[in-house]
Image (cartoon, rainbow, N blue to C red):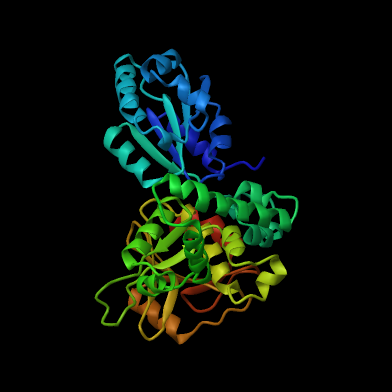
Amino acid sequence: MIKRQLATVLGTRVLQTPVVALLGSRQVGKTTLARSLEIGKPIHYLDLERPSDIAKLADPDLYLGKFADHLVILDEIQRLPDLFPVLRSLVDERRRAGEAFGQFLILGSASPELLRQSSETLAGRISYLELCPFNLTELKSRDEEMDRHWFRGGYPDSFLAADDAASRQWCEDFIISYVERYLPQLGITAAPLLLRRLCSMVAHQQGATLNLSRMAGSLGIDGKTVRHYLDLLEGLYLVRSIPAWSRNAGKRLVKSPKVYWRDSGLLHSLAGIDDLEHLLGHPLCGHSWEGYCLEQIIPLLPKGTNFTHYRTQAGAEIDLILETSSGEVIAIEIKRTLSPKLSPAFLESAKTLQATRGYFVTPGGDSYPLSESVTAISLPEFLSQVPHLGGFPR
């Protein structure tokens, strides 16, 4: 059992808010985390993919009324969107009776419909948390387990598999279940083969700027449909889109977002990469490492921190731009090397961005300065400092 960093936050949030929504993709560990909560009151769990549990909610007012002194966990809430008005009514009724917090914990696979319906019906009564796959900071031996974590990804069943072959099989089954079963449940009528081709295409273009017309032409569909499918994958926490930095900087900037598969294990499965040795010699290696580092960094960022990427038409680029709530700009370049070189293009780009600090994130080694304002730093050390953004060493 790997302790999740979100456990403490979730326990506190449940005691502060009538309804908490714990969102994330399937198989990320939402149910395990929710059922392990200890909040000083009994917990009642319902899985809304089980017909027997759905039958209990034929009269939800009557059934849920029996558990007024419980924290009720409703798993896969998007299966019964009609429950949201009932939850609102029960929350308001219990508020009047003095029971303000710790009433409902709803778990969902983060469909856009879930977010929209809960926001409209439970406005002012609900708080949202996202559970990501395992972060490197949650592992006991970060340096020793980093390569395994990078290759297998952070889904619990994949990372903890008996060997790489079992991990790869789990990722393949996960992708098939999404393409053939879950996406059609969300109203996607495209053939599974087309959806699989789209997923593979995004994988092979990991970290590339988005070109909808090129993808649409390759798939034989229109750009709007591709955009819709990508938005859906992003809403399901499978794909991450990083917007382009855009200011009146006097340069011709690339304004398209960069798109990444969020979990490196799924990425490697879609790209047909069998093991770490295969990955290290694959053309996708550098882009895979970049996406892996980004997905370790971004979930740890303090609230109010904006993130973008920077690229000019001339080809100068910086992988990640952080703008803190205080207005400070930090430029981050990700390199899979222990001896990164500081280029004039990076310095010129950082000057355009008015970045006060820069970092080259590497797989390991000691931190050392590349210039007065730029530091080379290992990924594990960098992650330990991300939650305290203002405390980065200068």
Q: Is residue 278 above or below residue 60?
A: below
Which residue is nearer to you in this view: 88 or 251? Answer: 88
Q: Position of residue 81 (x, y in %)?
A: 36, 34
Q: Residue at x 33, y 24 (%)?
A: 86
Q: Position of residue 257 (x, y in %)?
A: 37, 68
Q: Residue at x 41, y 62 (%)?
A: 241
Which residue is nearer to you in this view: 123 or 271? Answer: 271
Q: Is residue 266 above or below residue 82?
A: below
Considering the image in quadrants, where does the N terminus appear? top right
Q: Residue at x 56, y 54 (%)?
A: 175
Q: Position of residue 34 (x, y in %)?
A: 53, 33
Residue 132 can be seen in this image? no
Left or right position of 85 against 334: left
Please state the total of marks drawn on the protein image: 0
Give the image quarter of residue 324. bottom left
Q: Position of residue 265 (x, y in %)?
A: 61, 59
Which residue is nearer to you in this view: 166 or 66? Answer: 166
Give the image quarter of residue 106. top left
Q: Is residue 3 above or below residue 289?
A: above
Left or right position of 199 against 356: right
Residue 259 can be seen in this image? yes
Which residue is nearer to you in this view: 371 or 6? Answer: 6
